[in-house]
Amino acid sequence: MKGKGRLLEICADTVSNALVAQAAGGRRIEFCTGLSEGGTTPSAAQVREARKGLHIPLYVLIRPRGGDFLYGDLEFEIMKADIHFCGQAGCDGVVIGMLSPDGTVDTERCRALIAVARQYGMGVTFHRAFDRSRDLFQALEAVIALGCDRILTSGGYATAIKGADVIRQLIEKAGNRIIVMPCAGITPENAGELIRTTGLKEMHGTFRSRQASAMQYKNAKMNRQKDEYSLMLTDAEKIKAVLKCMNN
């Protein structure tokens, strides 16, 4: 599959990063915040501003906190409310995922979340809770049965390159029933290899680079583990380089 047959989705954690991704050629945005925690749901204001500025599809991550994917009743209600908001705000889709304690897909509650999304005609992606499931191929069938449009996965490994063989098997097993979208650790240097190994139709990544803060004053007495004076920003050149690989 060449050229326009492949789609690049960009994970963006700010409205500014989403706009950079769009301008660089990204064809869909997964919008979130808290990437250091694996991504959480962005604020209402951020979602509204992203919707105003984007003309490409906008999918919002529905995840009330970091950590595992086993959620309590209150968190479940919050997730449903967030999906209602996204639908009312004109988003194109949401990104969800819930597991049961035994590592299987929580089909009952995922089905309830999907039902809310469908009220607004939104698409649904099942996120990397999939990679934490007990059996990826059983989880694949469960997510297909739920009616999701795609699965975001690194094949159960830390990066898509490490999980490439499993991703290929998942894509083959899925056939035309669902899109299996590789993610995690994808760079301009390894994107071509991943495409050749897996035969992917869609790809997902943040494609960020660290840039220095414009702050001139820095309080040296504040010795923090994380560097406050640099930012991870969406890198348009990385996106363009990955797109070049996808179009070959």
Image: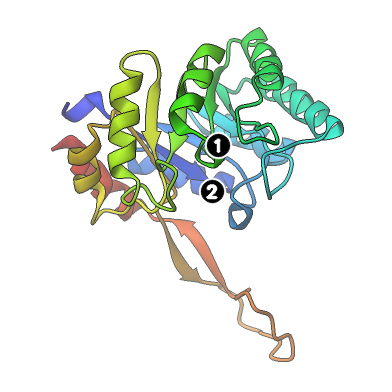
Q: Say whether residue 108 is left or right of residue 123.
A: right
Between residue 75 and residue 86, name the one nearer to us: 75
- Residue wearing tag 1: 133
Quarter of the rendering occupied by the N terminus: top left
Q: How far is the residue under mark 2 from the one under mark 1?
A: 33 Å
Residue farthest to the left? Answer: 248
x 58%, y 53%: residue? 35
The residue type indicated by label 1 comes to Ser
Is 233 drawn above or below residue 2 in the view shown? below
Q: Say whether residue 195 is left or right of residue 53.
A: left
Asked which secondary structure carries label 1, the reply is loop
x 51%, y 27%: residue? 139
Where residue 212 is drawn, which disc sits there? none
Asked which secondary structure carries label 2, the reply is helix
Q: Determine the image quadrant of residue 64.
A: top right
Earlier in the chain: of badge 2 and badge 1, it is 2
x 52%, y 12%: residue? 145
Is 173 drawn above or below residue 53 in the view shown? above
Residue 12 in the image: state x and y as whole percent: 52, 45
Report the colour scheme. rainbow
- Residue wearing tag 2: 16
Q: Determine the image quadrant of residue 227.
A: bottom right
The residue type indicated by label 2 comes to Ser
x 76%, y 23%: residue? 80
Q: Say whether residue 82 is left or right of residue 153.
A: right
Is 1 drawn above or below residue 177 in the view shown? below
Do we see residue 184 in this rendering?
Answer: yes
